[in-house]
Amino acid sequence: GPAELIEQARMAEQAGFQALWISDHYHPWNGEQGQSPFVWSVIGALSDAVSLPVETAVTCPTVRIHPAVVAQAAATSAVMTDGRFRLGVGTGEALNEHILGDAWPAAHVRLEMLEEAILIMRRLFTGEEVNHHGTHYTVENARLYTVPDEPVPIDISGFGPAATKLAARVGDGYITMMPDASMVEQYRKGGGGGKLVSGGTKVCYDTDRDAAVRTVHRLWANELLPGELGQVLPSPKHFEQAQTLVTEDMVRSNRVCGDDADEHVAELRRFADAGFDRVYVNQIGPDLRGFFDFYRTKVLPRLHEES
């Protein structure tokens, strides 16, 4: 819930983490995850609670919310955080975006919509009046009166070649969730150059490894679903049905679970070795105090020593 997210951010800052990611969902992926608060309200509270940079990972500015409205939310967030806000964007998931009854477009159409949305938001970040009549969006006499000194950086999420190509061409940074050096190379050679590359991983700290595996299997089995299921399934109940395909052995082989500091450090090093600039870590499960104490004392010092 919102209050727990704010407290988690405070613990992250105290533990020595340097930046925050926050998801932008209407629904959780399954009922066990339990909460899905409105991200822009939470970011407002974060701006007062911590001094860490904040980024959405990621917002879909194309279907559920018009890009002109997302631009206003992002600009205000940047002002409230004194310029420490980045807007992470992606093509979205039907889980969140179909709720108003809109058709869920094919992947190539979603990429077209995202590119047009980015164009609109960048124009609005200037503080000038915008009129736009495009393929997917219309904007009339729109002007943002609350804008940061510098335009909000827009990082683009990409999990395949087409999205990575778009990120390299029009993004201020690149987001992906796998430590895949080939994708980073494609991004940098395609126009990304020395721009920011960020990745994220989920772990489950617990002194009992088997208990950690069960926690991940209960809360986050959705991450191990194959193919495009994550983009096309329309509701949490459909994810719950699909998650019956995921076994605890699959979790054990694909997620860092337990309290072996070497495993946690190695997971983060995989991103560094693949050329990432930042890696974000999400604790799966309720033992957040244990996780932050563990990373503060056992994991983050190792990363500083080895860097």
Image (spheres, grey):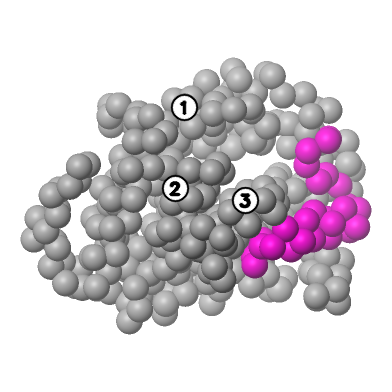
Q: Judging from the image, what secondary structure is the residue with disc 3 in? A: helix
Q: Residue at x 38, y 29 (%)?
A: 106
Q: Which residues are magenta?
A: 252-279
Q: Residue at x 23, y 65 (%)?
A: 124
Residue that sits furthest to the front in the current view: 189
Q: Amino acid at mark 1?
A: Val
Residue 183's tag is 3
Q: Residues within 10 Å of mark 3 (few under 14, many from 20)?
A: many
Q: Quadrant of residue 120?
A: bottom left
Q: Residues within 10 Å of mark 2 (few under 14, many from 20)?
A: many
- In the image, taking residue 41 as reference, residue 13 lies left or right, namely right
User: How far across and down, in percent of the image, does residue 272 sit?
Assistant: 74, 63
User: How far across and down, in percent of the image, does residue 260 sit?
Assistant: 91, 53
- What's the CA distance linking mark 3 and mark 1? 23 Å
Q: Nearer the viewer, residue 228 or 191?
A: 191
Look at mark 1 in the image and give the residue it sits on: 232
Residue 223 in the magenta stretch? The answer is no
Look at mark 2 in the image and give the residue it sits on: 90
Q: Amino acid at mark 3?
A: Met
Q: Nearer the viewer, residue 178 or 13?
A: 178
